[in-house]
Amino acid sequence: MKIAVLIKHAEDVRGVRIDSATGVPTLAGKAGLDRTDLHAISDAVDLKETCDGHLTAVGIGPAALKDDLVSAMATGADEAIHIVFEGEADTRFVATRLANALRDGNYDVILAGKLSEDYGTGQVAQQVAELIGIPHLANVLSADAADGTLHVNYELDGFADELTLATPVLLINGSREGEPSRHASLRGMMTARKKTVTQIEAGEPDASPLIWSAPMAARRGGERVIVRDEEPAEAAKKLAAWLREHRLVG
């Protein structure tokens, strides 16, 4: 079984700092694989080992993405494809370039995280599936193909369910807590750095109807009313009066 996992070189949102005067955010953290992709890679390796498959990590991004792809191979991926692109583009461009790289690979299963931790659009994986022309399933918890058939556990309206799926198919992880079960080991990193990462030039972005504005944190303005040292009943009356005055309640 041929498997691919999609990854992204994501900004570290834990390193975002907001200038209190201007509202402009700055990125102080180191970009790389976020928890969503770490779980996706771990799950892809799990699936690969249930069917003795072949796993390819695929991503689009700057030169630094190569380190993320090496990390994916150190975790258990067999090879990697780097679609080289410096700059920003909309999800349609990203999904199109990913689909172009995947289309001729005859992958049985493509795995992706629910959404990245930086921009978090949650659109790319679905767009890739549509562009390739294969079905997709979201909120996936786990998958195995030990008997040659793809069995998927997924969440539906808060309840776990199981499906047997035909391939090819794209699987999108649900939200995950905690750390992934698999990590890049030191020995794995040493081996992965000797492997070749296939590079593909992404080319220039297509014309887009979207206009990117500079990132800006929402300002909190307006008057504040603080109620202290009041009996609960009196405090509730003052709160209700304030809400009515500002037409926030009928």
Image (cartoon, rainbow, N blue to C red):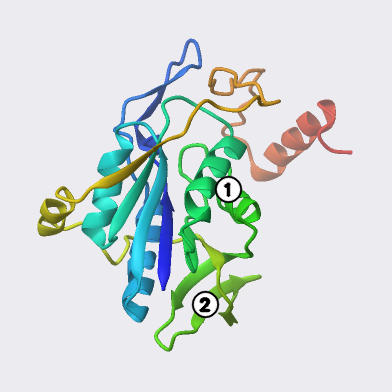
- Residue occupying the far bottom of the picture: 147
Q: How dense is the environment of label 1, judged by Cα within 10 Å: few (below 14), some, or many (20 and up)?
A: some
- Left or right, 44 with respect to 214, comes to left
Label of residue 183 in the image: none
Mark closest to the chain's N terminus, 1 or 2? 1
In terms of secondary structure, where does tag 2 sit? strand
- Residue occupying the far top of the picture: 21
At x 61%, y 27%, the residue is: 206
At x 66%, y 26%, the residue is: 208
- Left or right, 71 with respect to 246, comes to left
- Front-lying residue, 109 or 138: 109
At x 46%, y 38%, the residue is: 118
Which residue in the protein does label 2 denote?
153
User: Residue 166 at x, y = what percent?
Assistant: 58, 77
User: Residue 104 at x, y = what percent?
Assistant: 50, 56
Circles 1 and 2: CB distance less than 8 Å?
A: no
| Quadrant in the picture for the N terminus | bottom left
User: Residue 50 at x, y = what percent?
Assistant: 35, 80
User: Residue 17 at x, y = what percent?
Assistant: 39, 24
Can residue 183 be seen at all in this image of the molecule? no
- Residue occupying the far front of the picture: 104
Q: Is residue 45 above or below residue 240?
A: below
Number of numbered discs overlaid on the protein picture: 2
Which residue in the protein does label 1 denote?
122
